[in-house]
Image: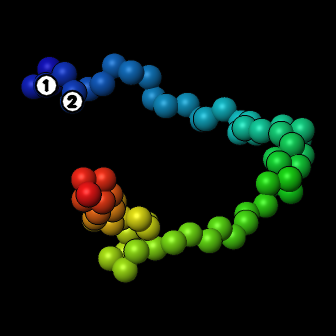
Amino acid sequence: MPDRPDDQPTDPPPSAPPPARRLVSEQDVEDADDTLFAHPPRVVRRWVCECGMDYPCSDVLFARLVKATAEAEQ
């Protein structure tokens, strides 16, 4: 008798895996080709602050808020 139940597993030995099935159909591949053709990448130009963050960064937003508040008080 084994000391632990794991010493003699009761599960049947693993059988051969079933034959591989395709995950996608031919129509799926054609649709994917059409989608990739209709949605090419494009270049996007954006501003970047000197600190490396997208412009306006939080510091610039805060500075604008301070200046706008000061001008509104005058």
Question: Residue drawn at (38%, 69%), measured in percent from left and top?
Answer: 53
| Element marked by disc 1 | loop
* Figure quadrant of the N terminus: top left
Q: Is residue 43 left or right of residue 52?
A: right
Residue at the spot of label 1: 4
Residue farthest toward the front in the current orientation of the protein: 74
Q: Is residue 15 left or right of residue 12?
A: right
Residue farthest toward the bottom in the current orientation of the protein: 50
Front-most of 46 and 56? 56
Amino acid at pointer 1:
Arg
**On screen, residue 63 above or below 1:** below
How many residues crowd mark 1 within 10 Å: few (<14), some (14–19), many (20+)?
few
**On screen, residue 40 above or below 24:** below
- The reply to whether dot 2 and dot 1 touch (C-beta < 8 Å) is yes
Residue 21: tell me if it is visible.
yes
Residue at the spot of label 2: 7
Question: Residue drawn at (37%, 80%), measured in percent from left and top?
Answer: 50
Front-most of 17 and 47? 47
How many residues crowd mark 2 within 10 Å: few (<14), some (14–19), many (20+)?
few
